[in-house]
């Protein structure tokens, strides 16, 4: 979350390579674009700042920034609009996303960069987003939505039928969604062409979409309490750019128009790996992070440990958790409670139904004022805690299909782990990063996966971030990504 807890979640990345041999050394190379603040209007600058803040700020890595900007420069020169300039911002978010705005602002998250494995995959993502700008999709979508709203108002106001007006708008939105899918396929076709003409392997789009689909499946199966890891402001590439088998087959057919699979074009894995080595992976410690059953927020200065067997997920609204059986869950978030309202009164105030007033009690947890209560619903029962920490109140809510005395004791024990972290603890916190390692002669995916500092499914995660299939063998001397401090 930001004030509460900030989450992460992952995107795609890739690296860049040399131009076609047909290009001469004295070919005109586009000049670097002007600085962002020199080109945006005050309104655009404000929107840029809001967008960057919603993704955890900008990620500062000059080497990585230069690599992406060089890739963009090559793509622009090979595009239908070589006169356009794009200014790249790397977003400090584990979400997997990339997008370009009509004003020339291009954004890519570090989560996406961590997922890609070579420069042609990165080029496929960037050229796809540039294609939306070239094809004027954003402006077209905005004009159509304005027209749909106008039609609904005419029906509501003139015909005096609000329900019919709402139905017309709903149908228009369905039509827009269908057209949006057409826009995505058009952007795929334009993007593959741009990437190929720039000298990149056009099959990078196929590989990236495949990896993205596998990452989406892993994320869906690992998601706790059935909720996404991305906030509304961070709708990611996996949601807006589904990696369907149909779409993969289409981009593969597009790529065949430009290159044979046996002679595909540039695919510089080594350069890309060097650029992302050390990239922060997953949650940024300043926004809170998870290690096993423990959540740690050095910036806000607290930590707590979930009951054994729980898997935790850090989202932008809350820390969520679920047990292996799926019959127990938890949520930790923060709210403001006025000073004239006691914590016991807050728990009884009706923000959750079914509170047993007789169960409300006041207590102290590691020096912090707190209150607890039990609430019961039709299918779930809840053990709730409200803990005053600084100017905020943290709500720690445990849910169970059946709240047995044994489970209730484990929930209370977990709440008692909520405590302040020392300055020394906060200073020693290190983020997880992408670490590039070279495969030895006896190394296997299992051996390298065992070196990863991840919570679960290490082998599957290793295979996905390296674009490998199960059963694949490592190449001696080849570079691979692992996730470690």
Image (cartoon, rainbow, N blue to C red):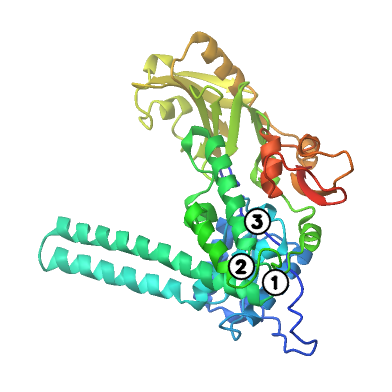
Say whether residue 196 is left or right of residue 453: left
Determine if residue 6 is in view.
no
User: Which tag, 1 or 3, sits closer to the chain's start?
Assistant: 1
The percent position of residue 189, horizontal first and vertical second, equals 52, 70
- CA separation in Å, label 1 and label 3: 20 Å
| Location of mark 1 (residue) | 71
Give the label, 1 or 3, closer to the camera: 1
Of residues 143 and 56, which is closer to you in this image? 143
Q: Which mark is residue 236?
A: none
The percent position of residue 473, horizontal first and vertical second, equals 77, 43
Residue drawn 47% across the image and 28% down it: 343
User: Which tag, 3 or 2, sits closer to the chain's start?
Assistant: 3
Of residues 16 and 252, which is closer to you in this image? 252
Asked if 98 appears above or below 72 in the picture, the reply is above
Q: Residue furthest top?
A: 405
Residue drawn 35% across the image and 27% down it: 353
| Location of mark 2 (residue) | 126
Circle 1: element type: helix
Q: Quadrant of residue 429?
A: top right
The quarter of the picture where the C terminus appears is top right
- CA separation in Å, label 1 and label 2: 8 Å
Pointer 1 with pointer 2, Cβ within 8 A: yes
Pointer 3 with pointer 2, Cβ within 8 A: no
Q: Residues within 10 Å of mark 3 (few under 14, many from 20)?
A: many
Q: Which mark is residue 92?
A: 3
The quarter of the picture where the N terminus appears is top right
User: Which tag, 1 or 2, sits closer to the chain's start?
Assistant: 1
């Amino acid at each position: 979350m930001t004030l509460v807890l900030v989450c992460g979640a992952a995107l795609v990345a890739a690296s860049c390579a040399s131009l076609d041999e047909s290009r001469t050394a004295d070919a005109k190379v586009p000049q670097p674009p002007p600085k962002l603040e020199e080109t945006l209007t005050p309104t655009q600058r404000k929107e840029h700042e809001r967008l960057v803040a919603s993704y955890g700020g900008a990620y500062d890595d000059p080497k990585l920034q230069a690599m992406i900007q060089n890739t963009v420069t090559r793509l622009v020169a090979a595009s239908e609009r070589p006169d356009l300039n794009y200014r790249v911002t790397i977003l400090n978010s584990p979400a997997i996303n990339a997008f370009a705005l009509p004003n020339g602002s291009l954004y890519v998250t570090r989560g996406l960069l961590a997922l890609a494995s070579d420069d042609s995959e990165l080029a496929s993502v960037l050229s796809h987003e540039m294609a939306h700008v070239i094809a004027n999709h954003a402006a077209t979508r905005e004009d159509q939505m304005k027209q749909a709203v106008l039609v609904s108002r005419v029906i509501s106001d003139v015909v005096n039928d609000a329900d019919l007006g709402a139905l017309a708008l709903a149908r228009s939105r369905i039509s827009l969604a269908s057209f949006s899918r057409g826009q995505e396929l058009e952007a795929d076709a334009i993007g593959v062409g741009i990437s190929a003409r720039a000298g990149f392997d056009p099959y990078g789009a196929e590989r990236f979409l495949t990896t993205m689909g596998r990452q989406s499946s892993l994320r869906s199966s690992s998601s706790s309490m059935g909720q996404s890891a991305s906030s509304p402001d961070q709708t990611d590439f996996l949601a807006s750019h589904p990696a369907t088998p149909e779409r993969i087959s289409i981009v593969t057919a597009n790529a065949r128009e430009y290159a044979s699979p046996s002679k595909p074009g540039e695919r510089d894995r080594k350069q890309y790996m060097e650029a992302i080595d050390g990239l922060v992976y997953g949650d940024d410690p300043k926004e809170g992070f998870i290690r096993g059953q423990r959540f740690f927020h050095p910036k806000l200065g607290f930590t707590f440990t979930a009951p054994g067997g729980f898997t935790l997920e850090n989202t932008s609204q809350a820390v969520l958790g679920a047990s292996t059986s799926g019959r127990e869950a938890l949520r930790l978030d923060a709210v403001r409670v006025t000073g004239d309202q006691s914590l016991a009164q807050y728990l009884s105030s009706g923000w959750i139904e079914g509170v047993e007033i007789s169960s409300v009690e006041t207590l102290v947890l590691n020096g912090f004022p707190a209150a607890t209560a039990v609430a019961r619903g039709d299918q779930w029962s809840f053990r709730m805690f409200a803990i005053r920490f600084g100017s905020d109140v943290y709500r720690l809510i445990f849910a169970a299909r059946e709240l047995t005395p044994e489970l209730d004791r484990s929930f209370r024990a977990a709440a008692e782990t909520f405590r302040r972290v020392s300055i020394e603890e906060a200073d020693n916190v290190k983020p997880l990063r992408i670490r590039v390692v070279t495969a030895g002669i006896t190394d296997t995916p299992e051996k390298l996966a065992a070196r990863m500092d991840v919570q679960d499914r290490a082998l599957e995660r290793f295979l996905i971030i390296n674009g490998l299939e199960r059963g694949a063998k490592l190449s001696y001397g080849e570079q691979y990504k692992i996730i470690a401090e």
